[in-house]
Image (spheres, helix red, strand yellow):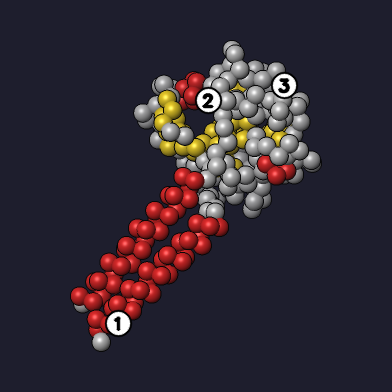
Amino acid sequence: MKQFNGFKKLLVAAATVSLSILGSAKAQAGYTTINAPWKGEDSQSQILSHQYGGNFQASGLNFTNGKVTAIRQDDKTNSSFHFDISSIKTISTFSGWSQGLAFGNVNSPTQLFNVTGKGYNAVGETGALDMPKSYSLVRTGKGGNWSSDATQNSDGADHLITYLLSGLKKSHGPTYVMFWEDGSKGHGDFDFNDLALQVNANACSPVTVPLPAAAWSGLATLAGGVVVTGYRKARRQMA
């Protein structure tokens, strides 16, 4: 029994170190820079405060008002989505250009809705949608189409910053806030406040968070090595 307990402790240690690897992988992942808002426009923290109340302040890469936290998602892995949609609604627009939302290929997307109005009076939404297994979202309107998948964009730039909301009341599924940039690289201000959307994912659809290949490789190697070492040690103790 002592030998088994020792082996069990080694497995727990492997899991603990593995979680450390995953945390380090995320910490090293790249995040797109968000510039200060253009004069007279609201920042992401101001938009969140207007929509969800309180005073959202930066906490590392996140924002929080003490009750609700907007958790920044990895920009490198958050280019495609894997959930059905319960609803999408426009929170605000701070741009002189028209805005809309679609999904699919950036050159021939399927339009979901167009936005009317400006600032916090902007209106544009959709109800429940059964989506493909994997898809990209596309900001449409004047200034061109920009995909959540930067590799599809003509300027190769990231045009979407996404936050997962934690602490919302009456939330029946994951809720995201998505901030879009509608200007092209070298011409846009990249303050990511041109179009802000609340996206509610269907609670019944799987929401996957892909990990970098290096993280999986490191995890498999380390965990495997610890387990094999523990097994050999247990065998020696039982011999």
The residue lying at 56 percent from left, 22 percent from top is 36
- Above or below, comparing residue 27 to residue 4 in the picture: above
Where does the image place residue 150, in percent across and percent down from the top left?
Answer: 67, 41
Lower sequence index among marks 3 and 2: 2
Given the image, on which type of amino acid does mark 1 rest? Arg
The residue lying at 62 percent from left, 35 percent from top is 160
Q: Which of 34 and 175 is in front in this view?
A: 34
Where does the image place residue 231, in percent across and percent down from the top left?
Answer: 34, 77
Where does the image place residue 98, in percent across and percent down from the top left?
Answer: 72, 23
Residue 235 is labelled as: 1
Left or right: 225 as drawn, with respect to 124: left
- Above or below, comparing residue 135 to residue 223 in the picture: above
Given the image, on which type of amino acid does mark 3 rest? Trp
The residue lying at 48 percent from left, 61 percent from top is 218
- Disc 1 + disc 3, Cβ < 8 Å: no
Residue 97 is labelled as: 3
Q: Residues within 10 Å of mark 1 (few under 14, many from 20)?
A: few
Of badges 2 and 1, the one in the foreground is 1
Where does the image place residue 161, in percent across and percent down from the top left?
Answer: 58, 35
Left or right: 200 as drawn, with respect to 1: right
- Does residue 137 appear in this view? no
Q: How far apart are marks 2 and 1 (CA)?
A: 57 Å
Q: How far apart are marks 1 and 3 (CA)?
A: 69 Å
